[in-house]
Amino acid sequence: MTSLLQRRETQLFLILLLMLVFIGIRAPVFFSAQSMDTLLTDLAILAMVASVQMLAIMTRGIDLSVAANIALTGMVTAMLSSEFPAMPVWQTVMTALGLGLMLGTVNAVLIANVGIPPIVVTLGTMSIYRGMVFVVSDGNWVNAHELAEQYLGFPIDRFLTLTNIVWISVVLLALLHLFLSRHRHGRELYGLGGNPEAAKYVGINEKQKLYIVYCLTGMVSGLCGYLWVARYAVAYTEVALGFELSTVAACVIGGVSMAGGIGTVLGTVLGSAFLVLIFNALPVINVSPFWQMAISGSVILIAVILNSINDRPQMKVILKKAQLATAKGAA
Amino acid sequence: MIATETMSWKEKGSSLFKSWESLLLILLLLICLANTWASPYFLDIYNLMDSTAIFSEKAVIALSMALIIISRDIDLSVASIIALTSTVIGYFATLGFDTFTLLWIGVFTGAICGGLNGFIVTKFAVPAIVVTIGTMSLYRGISWIVLGDRAYTDYPENFWVLGQGYLFDLIPYEFIAFLVLAVGFGLLLHKTTIGRNIYALGNNPRAALYSGINVNRYRFWLFVLNGTMAGLAGVFLTSRLGATRPNIAMGWELEIITIVVLGGVNILGGSGSIAGVVLAAFIIGMLTFGLGLLNVPGILMTIIIGLLLISAIAAPILIKKFKPAGGK
């Protein structure tokens, strides 16, 4: 067992605390209830999508179509809401989950059955789903006044002072954590990601696992599509553009290994918190939002370099350079 | 990715490899035929030559991206390198440098960006996809910091020639640059030891290392080369648009990778040809041009490109799968 201090989660947690202290000294206003509320709600959506992205990365894949899925599902639910204002929330949620699942299943079929590498499949479906947002909406926006009251209300209604988005996220992340740490299928995902060859010999059904990963990713992205559009009260073609990279970044910062087999829900949540904290703190400490992109890029680079220093393969090195080649081969 | 899956995928690819370029050629002819049938303006030599501007810049990067992907890496930062290059030459243009110097400054900037990618990938043994996702944000982020919501528009008087000039009033210089580079890359990959070694390290990096290829040196210089091409494309694009904004060339990395993969380069490394990549660049270019003539909105193009990407890879696998055994 690695000691507590060596764990990525602990390190990240301490860094987050330090950042909070620093921001608090520079701008106490950051700790106002309203600003914390925004931060938590931003975090809730990123953490949900990042933690399903983690499943894809953990099994040596990636899902680049999550953001396009969010945009398409968000647009479809928004258009349904403006067409049928009486539609109850549970139907909207079911539509979002169902449509998200459909989009995820397309990825799963192409990855598991046809056998195309996940990066190619989701690169393609990302373009297709994003284009379909334009097709279904004809390029039009759905604005707040066209959306039904309960559609907009449910995600930001409050229960015990926090928004429903936050509670949904807490429940979902807890379930995902239990699934990964306690359930057979969850454990087998680590096995598949860690050593696919060995996983096959112990009888892990690879196809079934890939279906679980990409269908789940699709479903959660679909749900977040509804939450996203309701939260910002507008749906248009470019919703969540580039968000897929934030989810990958959150995973990488949270210690998920691109080589597969390593990653925890807690780490990913902390990685998401790190990004959200930076993005929300910049305007408060008087840094132009134009710095946001470069900072997130630098953070990703620093995180991956630290990752690689932390998990150098622990094997006897015969040829010095072979070490690098091994790491490359694994990637 | 799983070793056995990788193998079978590769075998599926290579058995069709010889005919892949001919399939692409047929597809290209079909698209041109459809374009001719759909629009009377398509078969106009001036229109056709102008249309090469749609894809020349992307195609230039696709050439070096093909080498990167064949060697089992990937570079998602190319579009951001374009943005940074464009910003840097925009800055130097305001200082009064001439067109020729700006060209070299642009190419040099691209090379440095590529070098940083290559350095992190090889020095820290981090997968290229993560590194270049990071530098993708970093490079474009620097453009945002420098420019914000402003734009550089003060370029020297004759700067437009690079991106908008024509040889004999007919062939765009950009297109000529692409053709010359395509021949150069073709020779490099298919006729030299360097090219053979790139295939070798893409097929089996460890075996390549043991057979005396300095794997990391190759990977580093391929990233530098890719950055250089992105820098060159950045100069062309800036000259063609006459302005630099931080969101220049947004999303190009995916279109460029689509060209490479459609061109028959195995995304898992180890196989592919420059001829295929060139044909794929023409296919995407002619398709975009044809749909443009029909006033199809640009965003619909992304659906078609996405479908093309997936079906181009799925088709040979499915054909192989459903072909009766021993039907060779």
Image (cartoon, coloured by chain):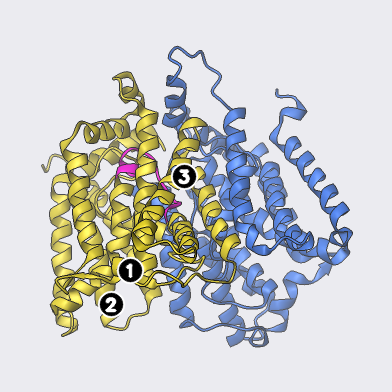
Chain colours: A blue, B yellow
Do the CB atoms of the residues marked 3 and 1 lie less than 8 Å apart? Answer: no
Q: Quadrant of residue B286?
A: bottom left
Q: Could you tell me which residue is drawn at 54 percent across and 65 percent down?
A: A241
Single out the mark in the foreground, 2 or 1: 2
- Please indicate, yes or no, whether residue B314 appears anywhere in the rendered image: no
Q: Quadrant of residue A291?
A: bottom right
Q: Chain of mark 3?
A: B
Percent x, y for residue A108? 44, 53
Structural distance between the alpha carbons of marks 3 and 2: 32 Å
Percent x, y for residue B121? 47, 36
Q: Is residue B120 above or below residue B297?
A: above
**Bounds of the magenta segment:** B67-78
Do the CB atoms of the residues marked 3 and 2 lie less than 8 Å apart? Answer: no
* Residue type, numbered disc 3: Ile
**B54 within the magenta span:** no
- Badge 3, how many Cα within 10 Å: few under 14, some, many 20+? some
Q: Chain of mark 2?
A: B
Circle 1 is placed at which residue position?
B304
* Residue type, numbered disc 1: Ile
